[in-house]
Amino acid sequence: MMHPYPGEIEVQMQRYYESLSEKDCRRYAAIEAVKLGYGGQAYIRRLLGCHHETLQLGLRELEDETALGQERIRQPGGGRKSAFETIVGLDEAFLRVLERHTAGSPMDESVKWTNLKRHEIAGLLGNEGIEVSVTVVDQLLEKYNFRKRKAVKTLATGENQYRNEQFETIDQLKHSYQTAGNPVMSMDTKKKN
């Protein structure tokens, strides 16, 4: 006849079980079930919340010297596959989504960023039929060397007596080029040291 553990021991067992790896969980549950004898498996499954198949695998592993010596938690190839392996066209869709939302440093072409937030990128990918989490978006941003960019607030460096004059000169030049049918392009050429 199986006798259940006292309540405080059950709580300790549950806390310990939760701290173990997947492999150690099933083996611990199996040892406890064997110790209790008849009715032990059902009791341990209820107490620890483990599945019947998990407990059976743990029981088989206790009998297998090779399995006990195994260091891996899962079999080779086990676990969830990466989104990069399972979602066809993920990289192309990501680059297509960011195509019109990418900016970069004029001084270093390898430095680029986007004005979109992670959840906005995930939403735009969803519109393309690709559902991903913001974690995958983070991985994509890192893969394609996008950096986080923060708005920097700086104080004005003061007034210059020729400030208005330079803008009037630019406006006159712009007007004369446009009148002559020439294109006008605006460019900020200041360089931070």
Image (cartoon, rainbow, N blue to C red):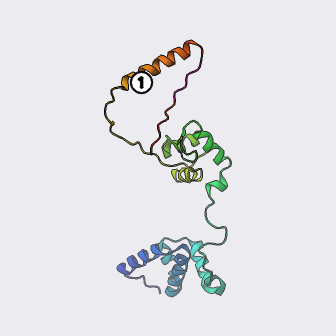
- Residue situated in front as seen by the camera: 98 or 14: 98
Question: Residue at 55% of width from left, 22% of height from top?
Answer: 184
- The single residue placed furthest to the top in the displayed view is 179
Question: Residue at 55% of width from left, 25% of height from top?
Answer: 185
Residue 163 visible in image: yes
Badge 1 amino acid: Gln
Question: Where is residue 181, by image quadrant?
Answer: top right
> Percent position (x, y) of residue 71?
60, 79
Taking 117 as reference, is 140 left or right?
right
- Residue situated in front as seen by the camera: 164 or 113: 164
What span is in magenta?
A: 182-186
> Percent position (x, y) of residue 96?
62, 40
Q: Is residue 17 above or below residue 142?
A: below
> Percent position (x, y) of residue 87?
65, 51
Q: Confirm whether the magenta stretch covers residue 183.
A: yes
Magenta span main SS:
loop
Q: Is residue 86 above or below residue 64?
A: above
- The single residue placed furthest to the front in the displayed view is 161
Identify residue for label 1: 166
- Residue situated in front as seen by the camera: 37 or 84: 84
Question: Residue at 35% of width from left, 40% of height from top?
Answer: 154
> Percent position (x, y) of residue 69?
62, 84
Mark 1 burial class by Cα count in 10 Å: few <14, some 14-19, many 20+: few
Question: Where is residue 76, by image quadrant?
Answer: bottom right
